[in-house]
Amino acid sequence: MFVRIVKMSFHSEHIPEFLAMFDEKKDSIKNREGCEFLELYQDKTNPEIFFTYSHWKHVDNLEAYRNSELFKNVWKQTKAMFNDKPQAWSVDKLVSLS
């Protein structure tokens, strides 16, 4: 299992549109094979910055999602709203406390 973190920054006028689109698509993303967890965060000091955190069983599962029509459509819509280049990291979880 690994974690995918994506940082996105939006023009403020597009934030409601992004949130509506994410709300509409979140279950379809979460229900992709290998996706075990999905969350969306908004920065407290800069409300234009958002992060998605998703947990994936295998890299192949993430790659299958990234090559899917769902991802292509979501990404096409999302990138049109950006005010900065997105950043993404795939990381291994080393410690988790609850």
Image (tube, rainbow, N blue to C red):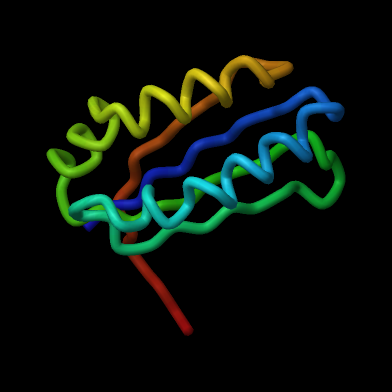
Displayed quadrant of residue 17: top right
Residue 84 position in % (x across, y down): 68, 16
Count of residue discs: 0
Residue 3 position in % (x across, y down): 35, 51
Query: Is 35 rendered above or below residue 5?
Result: below
Q: Residue furthest front?
A: 24
Q: Nearer the viewer, residue 90 or 17?
A: 17
Kindly identify the residue that appears in the image at 36 percent across and 56 percent down. Answer: 30
Q: Is 84 left or right of 5, judged from the image as shown?
A: right
Q: Nearer the viewer, residue 77 or 38?
A: 77
Q: Residue furthest bottom?
A: 98
Q: Is 38 left or right of 84, judged from the image as shown?
A: left
Query: Is 49 rendered above or below residue 56?
Result: above
Residue 40 position in % (x across, y down): 58, 53
Image quarter in which the N terminus is found: bottom left
Q: Is 75 left or right of 59, judged from the image as shown?
A: right
Displayed quadrant of residue 60: top left
Kindly identify the residue that appears in the image at 48 percent across and 84 percent down. Answer: 98
Q: Nearer the viewer, residue 81 or 97?
A: 81
Kindly identify the residue that appears in the image at 15 percent across and 49 percent down. Answer: 58
